[in-house]
Amino acid sequence: YTALTVLVVIIAVIFIYFRNESQKNETAALELAKVKQIYAADMFAMAINGDSLGMTKGLAYIVNEYGSTESGQTAKLMLANSYYNLRDFENADKFFKAYSGKNEMFKAAALAGIAAVCESKGDWINAAKNYENASKVSKNVPNNDEYMFNAIRSYFNAKDNDNLKKSIKAFKTEFPKSKYLNMLSRYDNGDQA
């Protein structure tokens, strides 16, 4: 009886937990939907803090209240990007690094965001490494060629010729039809092929 009772209690707790998480995710998604128009209009300060009437809570609120949900993770990425666009690189970096959602495209975007923050600080090597990592999250991410191109640009700016040559060669192999292929010439001195 004791083992059966414990099992029933554990199952009940798990059920309640997942139901709660599901409800939290739905609430976060509703709040996020309100913010998306403000965010899309490039009103980043309002997207972060919400409107003065309290109709839209803002990304910071969503992250604080629902950050563990998938919608909360999406809000975290949008919050990081909002800070980046306001040139608050410290907070942008904090929230890009805090992203832990399941969406592969967003994982890659978070790494690219970290790289962009590194670029803004002139840290070209870490920018390149993060862009390169972003390009390798999944073959299904449509921006992989852009991320790899940004890694090449960062290696060029860092004057890291060894990694520059390797990256250009990898780019030509992995993305033979990329729109960025023609732009490689400014970083490629011709001996990488």
Image (cartoon, rainbow, N blue to C red):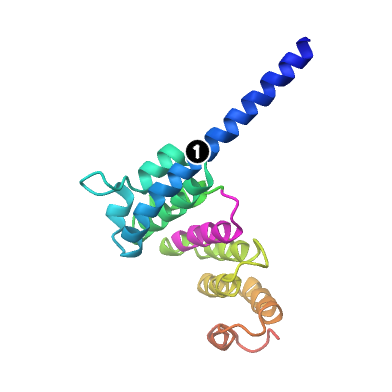
Q: Which residues are magenta?
A: 101-117
Q: Residues within 10 Å of mark 1 (few under 14, many from 20)?
A: few
Considering only vertical position in the picture, is 186 above or below 15?
below
In the rendered image, residue 114 lying in the magenta stretch gets the answer yes
Q: Which residue is mark 1?
A: 23
Please state if 67 lies on the left or on the right of 173 as rendered: left
Q: Quadrant of residue 44?
A: bottom left
Q: How many marks?
A: 1
Q: Closer to the camera, 100 or 40?
A: 40
- Of 76 and 4, nearer the camera is 4
Q: Quadrant of residue 65?
A: top left
Q: Amino acid at mark 1?
A: Gln
Question: On screen, 147 above or below 17?
Answer: below
Decide if residue 86 is in sight here.
no
Q: Relative to 35, say whether 157 is above or below.
A: below
Give coordinates of residue 77: x percent, y percent.
46, 54
Residue at 35% in and 53% down: 34
The reply to whether residue 1 is in sight is yes
Residue most extreme to the left: 52
- Position in image of residue 20 (x %, y %): 53, 33
Q: Residue drawn 35% across and 54% down?
A: 35
